[in-house]
Image (spheres, rainbow, N blue to C red):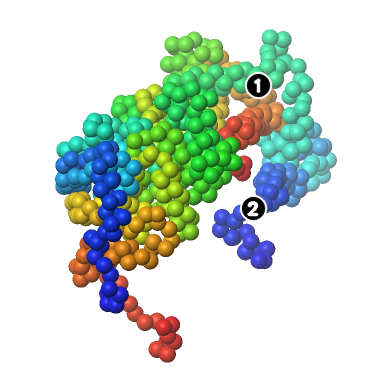
Amino acid sequence: MNNEIKLPSYLEQSDAVRSRFDRINQREIILEVRNLCKHFASKHSNVEALRNINFKIHRREFVCVIGPSGCGKSTLVRTLAGLEGHSSGEVLLDDKPVQGPGQDRGMVFQGYSLFPWLTVKRNVMFGPEMNGHARDEAERDALLWLDLVGLGKFANAYPHQLSGGMRQRVAIARALVNQPRILLMDEPFGALDAMTRAKMQTHLLDIWRNIDITVLFITHDLDEAIYLADRILVLKAHPGEVQEIIEVPVPRTRGPVSLTSPEFLATKARLEKLIHPDEAQESEEDEVVKPHMIRFTNVTDNVD
Amino acid sequence: MNKISKWFSVRAELNSRERTILGIGSFLLPLLLWCIVSYTPFIWHPKILVQDPGGVDYFQVGMLVDKSDFRNEFAKMQAQHLALPQGKPANPIYLPAPHQVAKAFYTSFTTKPEQRDMPWLYQSLWHSIKIIFWGFVISSLFGVPLGILSGTYARFGRLSEPFIEFTRYLPAPAFGALAVAVLGIYDAPKIAIIVIGTFSQQVLIIANTTRKLDVTILEAAQTLGTRGLNLLTRVVVPGILPDLYRDQRILLGWAWTYLIVAELIGTSTGITWFITQQARYQHFDKVYAAIMMIGILGFGTDLLLARLGRKLFPWDRSLDRI
């Protein structure tokens, strides 16, 4: 790309941003991943899904994980949630090893994971009820959190009556009502249209700013990652490995203007370079799929 | 859109008026066909109903003879200048006309049993319903929990399903003699046949339904802190309930199909006893009426259950239009 505008380095941070990162780094560590490896044994081969992943997340930090398809970002977050096991290494939550899924790690899935047989309110009450809270207490909490995500009016609706964005709001409320130490989000806005997605991103930042919650957010959308994250964990594929952990230099509070700031563009340029390193280098799919374009229209009949 | 291409628009949405009209039509069409065959003398009617035997010595009033026999006799009488036999085209005795069956439908209920210790029709029907009910309840009592367990926990499933898959191919009537030997000649072996016929299908179908529950829902529940038995009772069971209900409706239909075989085992009872009795006296109108009663009972129950399902599972989208 011959971009004429001179971009700053993505490593340059303003004083405000740098001091913010200093403050974050002084906070306690919520989640630590040490030498995490994961193999899938299939009939023909031993696939290495994750190799030697190391990172730490501090309290109230917003970390995004990004990478090309097949880099194992979903596997990573599912492993952290305890939904999948790992081959070696450690996942520590508050210095204690993670074993199986639990309410200390809330999760929001890409697909609709709400319980279709429960009303919105009962969906949110589900976690507290499972964890032994009294029903009226669970109901009070549920209504509070539904109000917070703006769905107080829909408490008695069923999930199928809600739009995609609203369902994800309920899913967020349902995870947060348990007061997890960390919120794991696996491409939660991936199935939403662009407008709804932008609204949801802003809303999520709002929630995060007001609540003591640490977020690990998986996405394949570069803009989304830069817009949301304090730090971005860039994975590469085959095997899934940490390529770089980028401290996003875009200052907070972020808004639509942030998307065109030089820091944003510099970070995006860097991410693009990491994720699509060489245009010349063909991916496996490109080697197999080779379109052979034939012109079917008149030579004078041009569209551009 | 013109009228013909409307019929061939793929998976078209029907409005409620069309649905009602076509639904009624699906019953009227076969009835219409039956009426045509029954009431138009020039269509089929392979027999002649003798109204006046004329000079034929073996003809009697009300006798059904083949058309060709009648024609031969008619020609013979003509040749011998004897009184000509009279008759009109008729269908065989085994195809009564709709109005005859409709009448039989009513008279079957009002006719006194031929012997005093024999049951009235309503008693026979009630007996059949009881057999179905207990067969289905006993099968469900074991089949539903086993199906859910097999579908939820892979090890249970692997331990039970291959053998049940095998038993599915063993025809339930084949166990008839055995059931009588073990359970006697009254109702128990009949109920056993319905259980045998329903159970294996039930386990396999429900295990499959359980496996179709979206795994994300189970994972979401786990990340919310659901563990152990709660995962089964609070997530799996309510999650599959509408589908389970639908399966049970289909399986109940299955149980009905085993009814006739079951009732022939040991001492014949219920609606099957009624049918065989009537067929013995060639009261085919009553046979048809009885067969229809079974259909009406089965279909009616299913319609009722479908209605009830919509009330029970307001969140279930697939029950929207029944």
Query: What label sits on residue B125 in the rendered view?
Result: 1
Front-most of residues A272 and A24: A24
Front-most of residues B44 and A81: A81
In this view, A292 is above or below A91: below
Q: What chain does badge 2 belong to?
A: B
Residue at horizontal 79 percent and vertical 33 percent from the top: B61
Residue B139 image offset from top left, x and y in percent: 48, 22
Under tag 2, what secondary structure? loop
| Spatial CA span between label 2 and label 1 | 37 Å
Labels 2 and 1 positioned on one and the same chain: yes
Looking at the picture, which amino acid does disc 1 mark? Leu
Front-most of residues B171 and A261: A261
Q: Can the viewer see residue B230 in this picture?
A: yes
The quarter of the rendered structure image containing the C terminus of chain A is bottom left
Dot 2 corresponds to which residue?
A: B14
What crowding class fits label 2: few (fewer than 14 Cα within 10 Å), some (14-19), or many (20 or more)? few
Residue at horizontal 74 percent and vertical 38 percent from the top: B98
Residue B115 image offset from top left, x and y in percent: 71, 12
Q: What chain does badge 1 belong to?
A: B
Residue A267 falls in which quadrant of the image? bottom left
Residue at horizontal 34 percent and vertical 33 percent from the top: A104
Using residue A244 as the reference point, say whether residue B179 is left or right of it. Answer: right
Query: What label sits on residue A101 in the rendered view?
Result: none
Looking at the picture, which amino acid does disc 2 mark? Leu
Under tag 1, what secondary structure? helix
Q: Earlier in the sequence, mark 2 or mark 1?
A: 2
Residue at horizontal 82 percent and vertical 37 percent from the top: B52
